Amino acid sequence: MSRSITAEEVSQIPQSGGTNYINAEQGVWSWLTTVDHKRIALMYLVSTLIAFLMGGFFALLLRFELLHPGKDLLDAKGYNQAFTLHGAVMVFLFVIPSTPAVLGNFLLPIMLGAKDVAFPKLNLLSLYLYWTGALFTLSSLVTSGLDTGWTFYVPFSTAVSDTSVIAVTFGVFILGFSSILTGLNFIVTVHKLRAPGITWYRLPLFCWGIYATSLVQVLATPVLAITLLLLIFEKVAQIGIFNPKLGGDPVLYQHFFWFYSHPAVYIMILPGMAIISDVIAVHSHRRIFGYKAIAFSSVAIALIGFLVWGHHMFTSGQSELASAIFSFLTFFVAIPSGIKVFNWTSTMWRGSIAWNTPMFYGMSFLFLFTIGGLTGLFLGTLNVDLHLHDTYFVVAHFHYVMMGGSVIAFLAGLFHWWPKMTGRMYNDSLGKLSCVIVFIGFNMTFFTQFFLGSRGMPRRYYTYLDQFQPLHAFSTYGSWVLGLGLILGLVTLLASLKSGARAPSNPWGAKSLEWETQSPPITENFKRTPLVTHGPYDYDTTEDK
Amino acid sequence: MSNPPNIPPITEDGFWLPAQASTIAAETDHTWWVTYWMSIFFFFLVIVPMIYFAIVHKRKSETEKTSPIDHSMKIEIAWTVLPTGLLLWLFALGVTGYANSQVAPDNSYEIKVTAQMFSWSFQYPDGTVSGELTVPKGRPVKLVMSSQDVIHSFFVAEFRVKQDVVPGLYTTLWFEANKTMETALQCTEYCGEKHSNMLTKVTVLEPKDFQTWIDNGGTMEKMPPVEWGAKLYASRGCANCHSVDGTRVQGPTFKGFWTKGSEKLTDGSTVKIDENYVRQSILEPATQIVEGYPNVMSAYAGQLRDEDIDALIAWLKTQN
């Protein structure tokens, strides 16, 4: 039996510079049949970034259409398809899989000191399911499109729409299994594959966040699968489940749908919070403030998140009592989120803050997510929601959470772990510039939409009252700035692959385990199973505690 | 482009919210402003320190030591308990206002609302039916709503009310308009291709003017049938699917309709175009679908008075 070595010893192993997980095997086949979590993560990265570009293209298209009332570029049908595909692609093909399947896959085993996830072959199956689901979903592009909104509300989707509802819902059904299997894999991995010395409280907070996310994926996604199957039954076999003309109940569909899709919001934001906890602590070179509070608030959000789905339905015709209860519970999700934000800010207090790209994205996240969270209070408050429901205020709110939160956090994480994943350093000035442009463009696009919504502009409108034109135009100009910033960020990363300096194993002076193996890591992650003797945030401190 | 014909703008009043025009609007806006200032407070509570720390603690050397303080029970309890209290206050404000907005007073004036792709229809207690919503000032109005096809939603910004209109279910909503005004009613649940055209005009009248409006069958001044028919064509959703300039939309165009003489149907039969054909096609459109067109029009049985159908026929005859 081999002797365990300490983390310090591992870091002193001379770097081979030669073999790593990327060049260990050659050829397309070696990638398609790999069970290495890091290679699978890279394939997810490429796939989800393609989805992001597609979703972004639809976003620019629909924003362009909204420059003026009436037709600019698309007709009403084209516009309805553009916003539907934007939502469906971004939610199901990008945001939900991005952080867990890319960064989670890559980092979780390394942070735990493991060689791979618990079920490597299952991990590869998840990827193939993702691709299969994506093919079904995107097949709508070459068939008859999709015009139901990403929510597939009945009876419009089952009784009226003549677009590819069945293909897309079946695609999302399959994507759900990809998500469930990834979640299952991660839960088992965290429980069983921690290296000696990694107690639960020595897990990086990234792992806690991914763990909480996995719980939601495993528990909520099956409900989506059932719902979509019922929808397909109704559409194909005319079995009356949701359509009142067949004896069904359309409000029941909304309960089923949001029972998954509200927790899905946490599938999207918890990994973002997980990234930010690590990014802020590492680039502040400081012990994270309130480790346990952040860890348990992730689990609390995951659990309370199951009890608030009815806040999407305050105007749906559900009972007034139900609305009151859901509003009450909704405020309790705000508390753990608030606790996290306070802890992150406190972590910067008397830290040593690096002004680099990941930290810029991290601070951008704090700014935007705080706005996203606080505007949620308006929507959770019952009488105010009656005015704001289904207006642009909601659109602005969830973009601040989903994009300003999840996507900006994903970018922070990508810039943070890029040297580890690819072995290359990128141009930090360009990275920071991209962050600033994205920040400006994002606020131009979406802050404007708060005014649109509070002044009464409904969402999902192809044309609109004249009085909203100036604000719509400004939001569209913002979308161009935002697009430019994102492309610059992507170019910065891609350019590093060609001309970036070689990354050292620990470019940020971080303390968690993934920085103690070489960049990029070898296939087995560590030459020997490390023995961990300190926490992930044990930075050098001043004496005056 | 300009607003759809006959749809007035939403009255603005300041930066954030539209003008108030119902009795509950002030309470809703009070909750809004409490939430607003609370949000501003917490936003600065987070962002000001973040920027301050980023500047004063900017890294000067790689070996810099940092604070060992990684928790504080006192401050953590404070930032848990204080927001919890404030959030409970918000909940209470919201639920009180919501309760007031959901329970209609007993003496409410009841209007039956029918929504369909892509038009609204309002039926008054005396049988008057209108495609626009006209209500008296100073009297609670209760809407009993249902949909003929998919889910729609009733939204009038100045009243601060919104309620989905669901097929197979009656939903209700009430408000009391407190000033005479005109505004737009917008559908706020996505309902298909012309969702953003599912708008109509809302008019609040002085009670005596409202009485005149009702007595005239849904108009302030009696109109000649052709003019009334033209108004119905625009306000009752006909224009969404039937053009008057020969363009093919979802349904057959009305241009030259009357002089055409006859129409070929999907079942292969031919039908003579006359008053009875038009009447039947409006009330039960599915019974005679024109060849080459989908069966998508909703039935208008019970939503138009005989005078309305007469007016539509009179107007149709003028479309050459």
Image: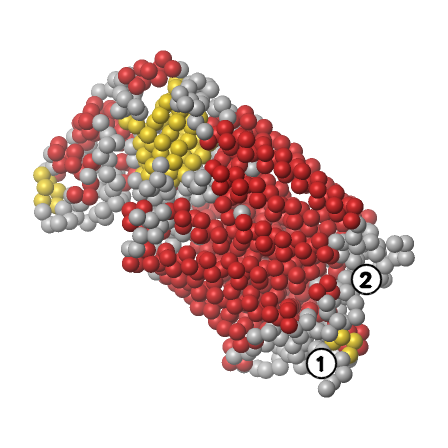
Pointer 1 indicates a residue of which chain?
A
Q: In the picture shown, does residue A15 fall above or below B193?
A: below
Work out whether residue A83 can be spotted. Answer: no
Q: Is residue B41 left or right of residue A90?
A: right
**For the residue marked with disc 2, what is the amino acid?**
Tyr
Instruction: Say if mark 1 contacts mark 2, CB within 8 Å.
Output: no
Callouts 1 and 2 on one subunit: yes
Q: Work out whether residue B125 or residue A137 is closer to the camera in this orientation and state it.
A: B125
Q: Position of residue B249 (x, y in %)?
A: 27, 43
**For the residue marked with disc 1, what is the amino acid?**
Lys
Q: Which residue is mark 1?
A: A527
- Identity of the residue furthest to the top in this view: B208
Q: Is residue B244 left or right of residue A435?
A: left
Q: Is residue A544 left or right of residue A469?
A: right
Q: Report which quarter residue A330 is drawn in.
A: top right
Q: Which residue is mark 2?
A: A539
Q: Position of residue A371 (x, y in %)?
A: 63, 43
Q: Quadrant of the N terminus of chain B?
A: top left
How many residues crowd mark 2 within 10 Å: few (<14), some (14–19), many (20+)? many
Q: Work out whether residue A79 or residue A40 is closer to the camera in this orientation and state it.
A: A40
- Tell me which residue sits at (72%, 67%) in the image: A199
Q: Work out whether residue A34 or residue A535 is closer to the camera in this orientation and state it.
A: A535
- Tell me which residue sits at (24%, 35%) in the image: B300
Q: In the picture shown, does residue A447 fall above or below A166?
A: above
- Tell me which residue sits at (17%, 45%) in the image: B290
Q: Position of residue B145 (x, y in %)?
A: 35, 34
